Image (cartoon, rainbow, N blue to C red):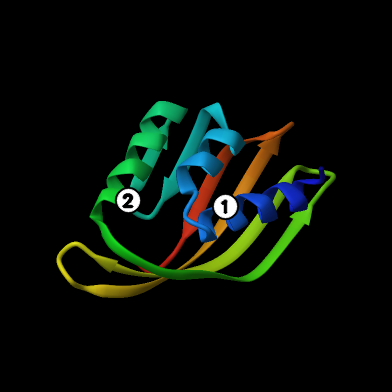
Amino acid sequence: MTYLEKAQDLYNKIGSGQLLEGFDQYYGDNVVMTEPRGTREGKAVCREYEVQFLGMVKEFHGMEVQSITSDEKNGVTIVESSMDVTFQDGNRANMEQVAVQRWEGDHIVHERFYYQA
């Protein structure tokens, strides 16, 4: 599988409600995830953050990948996506972001998210 195919599979899983399954499959044990709100290190810590996020979601209305590309030689994928969710407090949001993923073998070892905080 190419890095592009792996990223597409990951986002297909997320879009079909299998975020944690995709996370377990594609993220490395020592992954570092960086976003405007901070940095998390290690698969267990990053997974717990995803579990907490899912706990805040009341309803998932859909996800769309606007663009996806890869640099196969350097093991990098870039995904522009949006996610439409209603949170437990009733607020509905269309969250737009760009994720830059650095891969080693079958796993993401670093992911940086760009979005308006």
Q: Nearer the viewer, residue 17 or 89?
A: 17
Residue 88 at what x, y percent from top left?
Answer: 19, 62
Give the quarter of the image for residue 36. bottom left
Q: Is residue 109 left or right of residue 47?
A: right
Which residue is painted at 71% across and 47% down in the image? 6
Q: Secondary structure at mark 1?
A: helix
**How many residues crowd mark 2 within 10 Å: few (<14), some (14–19), many (20+)?**
some
Which residue bears the numbered disc 1?
13
Q: Nearer the viewer, residue 83 or 39?
A: 83
Note whether 86 is above or below 105 in the view shown: below
Which residue is painted at 52% across and 54% down in the image? 14
Residue 48 at what x, y percent from top left?
Answer: 34, 35
Q: Earlier in the sequence, mark 2 or mark 1?
A: 1
Quadrant (top left, top right, bottom left, bottom right) of the C terminus: bottom left
Which residue bears the numbered disc 2?
54
Residue 86 at what x, y percent from top left?
Answer: 28, 69
Q: Nearer the viewer, residue 36 or 81?
A: 81
Asked whether residue 12 is in view, the answer is yes
Note whether 108 is above or below 44 in the view shown: below
Q: Residue furthest right?
A: 73
Q: Is residue 51 left or right of residue 24?
A: left
